Image: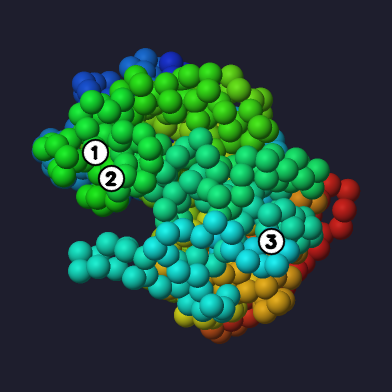
């Protein structure tokens, strides 16, 4: 008799349903065990930071053992593995079957000792928390406002900051002037403003953009504005409230929604509320314990020793658990969220969402929904948002009622790793499938995908100026599940190393049209079909090839085949590992992709929409 033990969390014959499961719903687990004598098989389940349960599995005729459980321990994570007691040749032994690697699904692995087992993750969520259609089906453009375009007729920079400097030429490279402590002492500006964004709406519309995500626009001393000085005032270098209203109105006419950056974990030291430098007439928390803002911050020793974001003294941390701060941010009828949202915003992206408690996130979401309809709330999360632990607490922000989705830095890491060959195609495929398995389905669709932001090295620079690989990265951005977000200038080959170099001025008149055309084609492809917006997602690999399928039906799908090598490669479907319910090899063979060739660092894209002929695009 063949001695086989096998379980694969990606196959519904082993776990039904696939992936994350709603609270109180049933899940069926089935493990194959072909052994001379099987004394017992148990499913071991532990609720996150909670109790562990041993549930006996029942034998079936096909050498499998099965049990169905209900997720009655509430939302959050469940971890599970299998315990098998086996008998052979007068010997009885207990073995365990769990995950091959930590935080990875799919096929498992046999372990001899329980303390060695890596369990599988099962996410349980409250309800399907769908984001608005305009967001989920859209394409976003991330604008660092000071670096996009100056819309003033004479090109002058209005209301320049005290103790700052302006670049002489828009081709100048960004730099900081810092003191011996590494603190920026002279901020620098190019002069981009909200008028400039309004004037460039026709360009963005031609590109196909439907969502504008703006870096912070409230008054602040810096060029990035994450050190807010006054949450109720637009920075005068950018414009004023009337200009914001005009931008929202004209963007709407162009078919675009505006998402603002909400920085509520901290303020600037140079702010109305802290007032370290005495810039504002208000008595700030730094100046006196009698300040109305004194309890908005946490002082270890007044006034010099206070909590700040990651120890950056220029960013004192707001006590967001303080009811007064909560009223100011989202509860009060004139709160930050309500004041600006009612102008007609599409939603908010929350800076450092890990720093805000689940209760605060729920409060912001509720206030947002009470103010405007069809709104979206996205959070900055750098890791897998389904299992993130921050400050010793498991976060539940994508399980319903908080964030619709998170900034998808894990996707960026996989794309970059795949293209610079720090990870192999098979590993990339497994990582993508693992995220699909871990995230609630609606959250997975609503992730804010990126290949670059103001916090990362420019994608072209990260790819060593390899334009062919940049095209691959851009295409992956548009074909993977979620909402694609372009960092301004990436669509025309803007370069830049880490901050501040990744914040160069947009190169108006010096764009790389070849790269720009790829972006336009991909946006049109996404807009003119359903597969890339709503299609299911499967990924496969073979040697140095990686493939992605976005599938709605046999009559509506997109297939992408990407070659990570610099040599021509042929796809051999017989070499594809079958580990999903979807029969990838048969599907590819049916559409004559069984021996297709892909040029070095190239991509082949096959598209079929209902009632149309199949089209193949080679890039």
Q: Is residue 392 above or below residue 321?
A: below
Front residue of this view, candidates 261 and 240: 240
Cα–Cα gap, marks 3 and 2: 32 Å
Residue 281, compared with residue 358, is above or below; it is: below
Image x and y of residue 405, in percent: 51, 38
Q: Secondary structure under badge 2?
A: loop
Q: Position of residue 209 (x, y in %)?
A: 71, 53
Q: Which residue is mark 3?
A: 152
Q: Residue furthest front?
A: 281
What residue lies at 59% left-to-right and 63% top-to-bottom? Answer: 157
Q: Which residue is mark 1?
A: 286
Q: Quadrant of residue 346?
A: top right
- Residue at point 37% right, 15% down? 72
Mark 1 or mark 3, which has the lower sequence index?
Answer: 3
Contact, CB < 8 Å: mark 2 with mark 1?
A: yes
| Element at label 3 | loop
Compared with residue 95, is residue 416 higher up or lower down, i.e. above or below?
Answer: below
203 horizontally vs 490: left or right: right
- Disc 1 to disc 3, C-alpha distance: 37 Å
Label 2: few (<14), some or many (≥20) within 10 Å? many
Q: Nearer the viewer, residue 576 or 274?
A: 274
Residue pointed to by mark 2: 276
Between 468 and 323, the one nearer to me in the picture = 323
- Give me the residue at 67% from left, 73% from top: 508
Q: Position of residue 602 (x, y in %)?
A: 62, 76
């Amino acid at each position: 008799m063949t001695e086989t033990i096998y379980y694969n969390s990606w196959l519904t014959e082993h776990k039904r349903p696939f992936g994350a499961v709603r609270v109180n719903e049933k899940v069926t687990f089935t493990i194959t065990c072909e052994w001379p004598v099987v004394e017992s098989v148990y499913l071991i389940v532990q609720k996150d930071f909670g109790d562990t349960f041993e549930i006996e599995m029942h034998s079936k005729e096909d050498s499998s053992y099965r049990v169905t459980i209900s997720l009655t321990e509430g939302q959050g994570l469940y971890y599970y593995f299998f315990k098998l007691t086996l008998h052979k040749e007068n010997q009885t032994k207990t073995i365990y079957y769990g995950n091959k690697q930590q935080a990875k699904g799919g096929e498992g692995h046999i372990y001899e000792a329980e303390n060695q087992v890596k369990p599988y993750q099962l996410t349980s969520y409250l309800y399907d928390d769908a984001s608005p259609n305009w967001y989920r089906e859209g394409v976003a453009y991330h604008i660092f406002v000071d670096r996009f375009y100056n819309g003033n007729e004479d090109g002058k920079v209005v209301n320049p900051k005290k103790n700052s400097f302006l670049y002489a030429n828009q081709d100048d490279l960004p730099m900081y002037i810092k003191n011996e402590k590494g603190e920026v002492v002279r901020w620098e500006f190019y002069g981009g403003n909200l008028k400039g964004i309004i004037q460039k709406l026709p360009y963005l519309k031609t590109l196909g953009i439907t969502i504008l995500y703006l870096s912070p626009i409230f008054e602040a001393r810096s060029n990035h504005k994450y050190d807010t000085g006054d949450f109720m005032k637009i920075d005068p270098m950018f414009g004023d409230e009337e200009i914001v209203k005009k931008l929202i109105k004209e963007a709407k006419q162009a078919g675009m929604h505006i998402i603002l950056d909400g920085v509520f974990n901290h303020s600037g030291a140079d702010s109305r509320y802290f007032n370290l430098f005495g810039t504002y007439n208000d008595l700030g928390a730094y100046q006196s314990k009698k300040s109305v803002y004194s309890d908005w911050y946490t002082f270890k020793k007044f006034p010099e020793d206070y909590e700040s974001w990651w120890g950056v003294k220029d960013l004192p941390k707001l006590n967001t658990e303080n009811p007064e701060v909560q009223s100011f941010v989202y509860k009060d009828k004139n709160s930050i969220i309500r004041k600006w949202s009612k102008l007609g915003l599409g939603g908010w992206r929350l800076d450092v969402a890990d720093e805000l408690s689940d209760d605060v996130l729920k409060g912001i979401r509720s206030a947002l929904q009470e103010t405007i309809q069809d709104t979206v709330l996205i959070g900055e999360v750098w890791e897998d948002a389904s299992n993130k632990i921050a400050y010793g607490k498991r976060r539940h922000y994508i399980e319903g009622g908080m964030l619709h989705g998170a900034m998808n830095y894990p996707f960026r890491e996989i794309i970059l790793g795949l293209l610079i060959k720090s990870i192999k195609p098979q590993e990339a495929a497994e990582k993508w499938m693992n995220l699909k398995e871990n995230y609630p389905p609606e959250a997975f669709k609503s992730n804010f995908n990126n290949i670059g932001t103001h916090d990362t090295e420019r994608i072209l620079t990260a790819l060593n100026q390899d334009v062919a690989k940049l095209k691959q990265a851009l295409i992956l951005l548009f074909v993977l599940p979620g909402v694609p977000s372009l960092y301004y200038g990436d669509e025309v080959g803007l370069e830049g190393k880490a901050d501040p170099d990744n914040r160069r001025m947009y190169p108006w008149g010096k764009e790389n049209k070849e790269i720009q055309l790829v972006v336009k084609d991909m946006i049109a492809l996404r807009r003119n079909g359903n597969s890339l917006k709503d299609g299911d997602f499967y990924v496969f690999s073979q040697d140095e090839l990686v493939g992605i399928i976005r599938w709605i039906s046999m009559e509506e799908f997109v297939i992408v085949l990407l070659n990570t090598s610099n040599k021509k490669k042929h796809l051999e479907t017989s070499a594809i590992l079958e580990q999903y319910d979807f029969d990838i090899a048969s599907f590819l063979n049916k559409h004559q992709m069984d021996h297709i060739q892909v040029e070095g660092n190239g991509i082949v894209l096959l598209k079929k929409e209902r009632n149309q002929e199949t089209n193949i695009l080679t890039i």
